Image: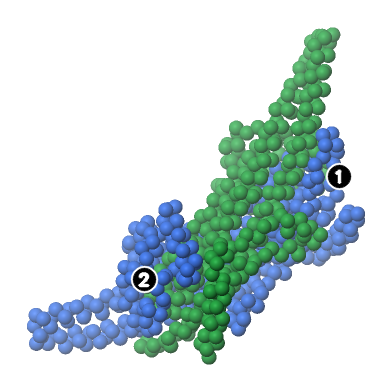
Chain colours: A green, B blue
Amino acid sequence: MSRRSTEGSRFSLSAQWNRALSFRSSHRSSAGTTNTTTSSAHSTNTPSSSTTTHHRKPFSFTSLRGASQPPLSKRLYRLIKSANGLIAAHETAARERLSIATQLSEWGEQTGDDALSDVSDKVGVLLSELGEQEEAYAGRLDGESRAVLKVIRNTEKSVQPSRDGKRKIAEEMGKLRVREPQSTRLVTLEQELVRAEAENLVAEAQLGNVTRQKLKEAYSAEFLATIERAEKQAILARHGLRLLQLLDDTPVVPGDVRPPYAHASQSRQILNDAEDDLREWRLDAGFMGDDKTVVVDGTSPVAPKVEEKGKQKEKRDKKAEVGRESIANTG
Amino acid sequence: MSRRSTEGSRFSLSAQWNRALSFRSSHRSSAGTTNTTTSSAHSTNTPSSSTTTHHRKPFSFTSLRGASQPPLSKRLYRLIKSANGLIAAHETAARERLSIATQLSEWGEQTGDDALSDVSDKVGVLLSELGEQEEAYAGRLDGESRAVLKVIRNTEKSVQPSRDGKRKIAEEMGKLRVREPQSTRLVTLEQELVRAEAENLVAEAQLGNVTRQKLKEAYSAEFLATIERAEKQAILARHGLRLLQLLDDTPVVPGDVRPPYAHASQSRQILNDAEDDLREWRLDAGFMGDDKTVVVDGTSPVAPKVEEKGKQKEKRDKKAEVGRESIANTG
């Protein structure tokens, strides 16, 4: 993505969001037809009249890479390429998070300040889990959304020859009618055309069915992954805020000694709570109304890794014991 | 970040998360002291005994860039550099999202299928808003967290000379005592040392105060930004799932014509709902318990851009009218 092209799309997006809550100014009902087997627009690659020029900008660069694609699958080919960039960006974000988490813990230790050292270490643990969630998100975008869009693209690719074949026969008949209207070959071509049209009818129906099913599947998966990452990262962040409250930042005058740090058990408890909350997270599909079931089926809330550690019992015990300590400490 | 070094840190993180919920195997209570003015560990850059070697790996590359920094501020200098990488990654993710959103809308239009066209267009609008949220997140990490960490780093930098000065005087006295124990210069140096120690006592106190205050400030802001992005993106994703339910993906046999698409008003309504939910989003600080107030003060829930558009009235009207349509359509 070049900065310029991005701003091009950015501009058009916000402009549209302000107005019709749509990328396109024209009303959908006026464009295309309700018949999935009639895809004339599908086979052309020029923007329809309802597409304003600044919508084209974003493609001015990627179009070079897409040139080898048949017109029908060109757009999706590019979209899938962009999805690759999106996934890579989230993977990078995850790596940087994990690196920052370690560095923060290391830095805190070197301050030689007990409170800073403990809080920065525990915050680091939460940040690293934030990174793990980011990485899992990237993985799901790749495996459950981008991979599914490829199925649509491949079907589009495979339908192209059927359209071309049909067109060629029709063209040849047109020429022949002019040159020698009496040619018996016209009869043969007529039969070929009927066969080609039947074949194409099937191909277009397949394309319509695959496209609807897979688009729904791909973006349902993407939205579900977005919800899971969002809610788990919000859990981690809220516990992070609790951790920071353990750090006494009232200024001391030179030479004074801070009261010793007494919250080590509480900070450990906060990490335990975060671990429990992640493990107990489930998708709330209440939002979906009558579609609720669809979504609940669609998702499989992945239990966070921490679950596999079979140390729940131990943790519970620690939790209870620490709970008492905490009360004692916060006096 | 090199892949190898990342995996190095990744390994150590998960290993630690499994065990002590800490990056460091040793117990904090054993390291450092509770006196922020005693920062001997602070002035050395070699890993303490409690730091295992795989913790060092991640720095094997960045250490070159940090070489120009005084030892005291080296670690934070690197951490701030990594934060820069994190922010850039989220900015890239935002750009790709916005590009994908436009491409999806364009692609849907070219299918010539009313349902695909409308749903892909509206899903594109939600994806673009998802991108806007990602971008806002990157901006807050940069302005409210990374910038604040720089204040700590600069204080660390400024404290270094004070430590060096103190050490030099002490060393000179040590040599002199050996060479000429009777030297009157020892008296002068003694006085200089007392002054240097007083100066350093203040510097170290300042460092301790600034470090605690700014660390708390930086990561509170980062966690609050994480919560806001997470909850707003979850809102958008849930409405996205609703949108996809409007796409009928039951297969049709070749030649059959799908029933005309009748959900245009509902899809518009879903975008209106998403817009309303974003605007009405507020931080729920319930999680914070007694620290609630602190956090609520700490945050300033940024009203989404859509709020500034002074089209609420119009929207409400559309909403009501659309509401009736929807009921009519879903018959």
How busy is the neighbourhood of tag 1: few (under 14 within 10 Å), some, or many (20 plus)?
A: few
Question: Could you tell me how far apart the alpha carbons at marks 1 and 2 are, in whole angstroms?
Answer: 69 Å
- At mark 2, the secondary structure is loop
Q: Position of residue B308 (x, y in %)?
A: 70, 65
- Specify the subunit that label 1 lies on: B
Residue B259 shows in this picture: yes
Residue B82 shows in this picture: no
Q: Position of residue B260 (x, y in %)?
A: 86, 44
Residue type at mark 2 is: Ser
Decide which of tag 1 and tag 2 comes sooner along the chain.
Answer: 2
Identify the residue under disc 2: B50
Give residue A230's quadrant in the image.
bottom right
- Specify the subunit that label 2 lies on: B
Closest to the observer, B13 or B312: B13
Q: Residue at x 85, y 37 (%)?
A: B256
Identify the residue under disc 1: B260
